[in-house]
Image (cartoon, rainbow, N blue to C red):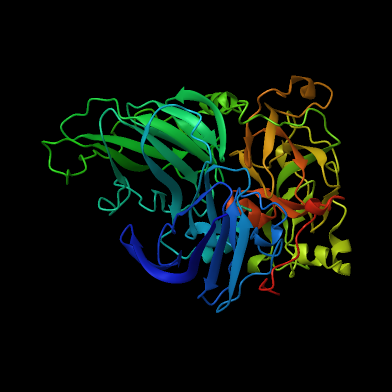
Amino acid sequence: QTTQRFQFTVEWKKVSRLCHTKPLLTVNGEYPGPTIAVHEGDDVEVKVTNRIAQNTTIHWHGIRQLRTGWADGPAYITQCPINGGKSYTYKFKVVDQRGTLFWHAHYAWQRASIYGAFIIYPRLPYPFSAPIQAEIPIIFGEWWNGDVDTVEKEMTMYGAGPNLSDAYTINGLPGPLYPCSNEDTFKQTVERGKTYMLRIINAALNDELFFAVANHTLTVVEIDAVYTKPFKTNAIMIAPGQTTNILLTADQLPDSSGMFVMAARPYVTGIFPFDNSTTIGFLRYKQPRIAEKTKIPTIPNGSFALGNLPEMTDTEFATEFSNKLRSLGSPQYPCNVPKTVDKRVMISISLNLQDCPANKTCKGYKGKSFFASMNNQSFVRPSSSILECYYKNLKIINKYAGFPEKPPREFDYTGGNPMTQNMNTEFGSKLLVVPYGTNLELVLQGTNLLNEENHPIHVHGHNFFIVGKGFGNFNAAKDPSKYNLVDPVERNTVAVPSGGWAAIRFKADNPGVWFIHCHLEAHTSWGLAMGFIVKNGPGPSQRLLPPPPDLPSC
Ligand code: C2O
């Protein structure tokens, strides 16, 4: 049994991008943060020391945290934050998982710059045969010239504009399509004829992205650290919170520059003035006769070939791509989708626009503000850790029980004025409670005020299977008969289609308190979240472990 130990120090570091220098929150001074690489079955210990004058927590996104919810990380859900000057050691075991995940801060918008790759090497050889020359992490992020805390505040205020980031980044680098960024361009050298595994992570705060490499075909082999049936595609789509492993063979004949462009830009469905900028990097074919330090080819503004990148609003590609994702379902890696369910919960996802209630501060703004809700509850984080209250049986937990199992009313998605159909939301922290081992189905129904983008809904502590998806309203009488219960894809974050629904299933076999939320950070700030409790099971190995002694207190 191996224990892998890491030291994370959360600290400010001056970083420059787009000719703006500003203090940036980092781990160990690195941006993006350090890569954690471990093996399936390892015990992991990360000592996080907070050297900033604000709270922080770190979340190991997609790690199941079987019985170790104390190490999951979302502030006020599974722990009180780590105060400035304090430290906390996250201890957990990587059980029956392998592939690409990531870690990020889970306090306010700190994950804007506090994130990094989390790689789990498998016990068994990869289930695909191509020899891999090298594995290349590709992490998408966003850069703001200004202060991210201010952006978070303004996001909530109606009429303040969408507060877009100033650049998308690949491994922290925006690339030459942004001002002043020629030097800050990601370049990866490859050898002709060799195959590479790209470990792609979308750590951006607010945008689902398309990604493509000019002239090259991508083979998708894994999603959210679960193997898939391999398939070839010209581009991929990846929402915040999702990860995708692809194989790429350097099989093209480069021109004299030796360069092929790779590019990522958002997928949106609306007409809102969303950011349509593009981050690019380069694959550089190793060529003996060309000097190593090849310059980036000059890119005539706006008019260079983006290769295979879909248009920003290409819903057809988006739908096709997500339909191609299937569990590998091999004898070694079977697809364990629950064939029957014990409980189906209908959850409406709404964006709301309403006056700030008197008992809320609404980030300092009065008047109309944006909120978001699940089943008409806009999630409010309490001032203590829900998991701790639950474990210690503190009275306060009563306040949190009783999440409604269906929306307060049916939302007619196909007709009517969405402005009038939008419900004013309530504010609260009610939780869904399920017994250990429940086969749970969640039907996530979009009922957005603004139909602009998919909602990447992330479930903590569990992977799930996407058994169905569609546009319009979910039909409880008809749609379940069309579910895929043979090889649905297993993952931890589902992009609920804009103007549609997604049905997910999983066995609730991880006792504790778990967060479910939209991985668009703006929507989480607005309250697009809920929590659920999985009760202890009867067996000794079906119980939440006791809290570690150094667990922070509020
Ligand atoms: Cu990646 Cu609750 O987060």
- Which corner quadrant holds the N terminus? bottom right
- Give me the residue at 63% from left, 60% from top: 73
- Which corner quadrant holds the C terminus? bottom right
Q: Is residue 208 above or below residue 353?
A: above
As rendered, which of 466 and 99 lies closer to the eye? 99
- Position of residue 471 measured from the top left corner of the image (x, y, whole percent): 68, 27
Relative to residue 32, is residue 57 drawn left or right? right
Q: Is residue 261 visible?
A: yes
Q: Is residue 161 visible?
A: no
- Position of residue 157 measured from the top left corner of the image (x, y, whole percent): 62, 59
- Position of residue 86 measured from the top left corner of the image (x, y, whole percent): 58, 77
- Give me the residue at 41% from left, 36% from top: 197
As rendered, which of 217 and 296 lies closer to the eye? 217
User: Tag count in the figure?
Assistant: 0
As rendered, which of 547 and 27 lies closer to the eye? 547
Quadrant in which residue 55 is drawn: bottom right
- Residue sitting farthest toward the bottom: 85
- Position of residue 343 measured from the top left corner of the image (x, y, whole percent): 85, 37
- Give me the residue at 40% from left, 27% from top: 130
Relative to residue 403, is residue 63 drawn left or right? left
